[in-house]
Image (cartoon, helix red, strand yellow):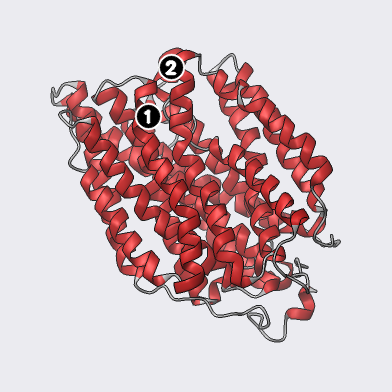
Amino acid sequence: MTDLAAPPDRKAPGPDTRRLIGLLVGSAFVVILNETIMGVALPELMREFDVQATTAQWLTTAFLLTMAIVIPVTGYLLTRFPLRSVFVAAMGSFSVGTAIAALAPVFAVLVAGRVVQAVGTALMMPLLITTILNLVEPERRGRMMGTISIVISVAPAIGPTVSGVILDQLSWRWMFWIVLPIALVSLTIGSRWVRNVTEPRRVPVDVVSVALSALAFGGLIYGLSSIGESAAGHTPVDPWIPIVVGAVALATFVARQLGLRDRALLDLRAFRVPAFSIAVALVAVSMMALFGTLILLPLFLQDVLGLSTLQTGLVLLPGGLAMGLLAPVVGRLFDRVGPRPLVAPGAAVASLGLWGMTTLDAGSGRPTVIALHVVLSIGLAFMFTPLLTSALGSLPAHLYSHGSAIVSTLQQVAGAAGTALFITVMTRGVVAGTEDGVPLVEATADGIHAALMYGGVISAIAVLVALLVRRPAMPQEEPVEAQEPAAYH
């Protein structure tokens, strides 16, 4: 596949470039915020639409799953179409989905609105990352990727706070009515400001790869989510069927991409770069912990501690603020010291936070929850920026859009898998507890404890892997295979 070439002159960003990146960052923040904005609203939505937690979590899982299906195509879209056209399509889709969700009369329509939103969200992150890689010189990428980390990690982290503040005074529909005009303004300004910094090229798209990608990621995430529904007795299909189908489709997809080489939908030769592979694996683990925790904590705070939606949002706010304040600082530190001195301690701190959360029970106070959430957030803040910069900075220029699509895809798959895993374990714990006569509040607390234990184990593995992280070399002048650059340009 023809790919995006880096411009020959990448000096310090000028005013026009900073304005372009600022618009893209602001737009991406708004759309990524919606990944977790539904978390605090789940109990209210469960009551209004009369659905179980395993069904309600599809508001988040369907969003992430749609992104995982669409993002692999973004490498092709960013090569084939002008940047402005992709931006308009992204913000237009997001705006339409937001309107559908705001007007949803039944739960199924609300999920459909979230899916349409996710299509726009899926386009925004690779668009933002690829634009920065093409416009910003390597020596300044740490700071710029720190800004991107605010979008990737802080926006989801403060989603529960935003929805909690809204739900305290208004109905859940206002979570969408408030966002809609912001999205429309961004769409209007972007249609004028966004300039085409890449040269579109007519390249073929492998339809079979698109179908395999959708079947692979769709099957895996649907199957993982269905395990939770199965535990509660609400699944029409044995969850292992879609999991096996998804796994087979994924293996076929990988084999086809390696065979297509220059015409691949996702050029998986990026994984031949060790720094990329290690960093991406740690990003995936971090996203599992982040999204799994973000869906469990609101349920714990409301169903176990009995807090209101506003109180829940405020409890989760300090952690989001900590990530936001640290992201630019970590970006500057990365430019000076590289990834390992930041990632290894960050992984240890994040693991400490997750293990601390396993001690939460019905008698835990709000200060304890806030402190543990802040500890987890600080650890993740020291991981996201160095890992993203290391992963993408280790690739040759002709793999930029493929690398950003791979990273974004795995982020969403890992987030959906984390959500499904944590909810599944929690649900099984609640069902087992209530069947044994344990009061619902205590059974819920026990189920959440069991889920967080899984998170703690995963985070401990991440600490060991973090020791392998190294500063990336400067590969822009050397493609993965020396004989192949001409095929890309």
Which residue is at a point 42% across and 37% down the rendered structure image?
226
Label 1, residues with CA under 10 Å away: few <14, some 14-19, many ≥20? some
Image location (x, y in percent) of residue 244: 46, 51
Instruction: Give the residue at x 37% y 35%.
Output: 316
Q: Counting other residues with Cα less than 10 Å from the Cα at mark 2, is it few (<14), some (14-19), or many (20 or more)? A: some
Q: Position of residue 310 (x, y in %)?
A: 39, 22
The residue indicated by pointer 2 is 168
Q: Is residue 57 visible?
A: no
Q: Nearer the viewer, residue 382 or 294?
A: 382
Left or right of residue 170: residue 92: right
Describe residue 101's horizontal placement relative to residue 184 as left or right. left
Kind of residue sitting beneath label 1? Leu
| Amino acid beneath label 2 | Asp
Residue 46 point in image, percent of width and height: 42, 19
In terms of secondary structure, where does tag 1 sit? helix
Check the image and name the residue furthest to the front: 15
Q: Which mark is residue 314?
A: 1
Is residue 159 depicted above or below 77 in this figure?
above
Please provide percent x and percent y for residue 318.
37, 38
Mark 2: secondary structure: helix
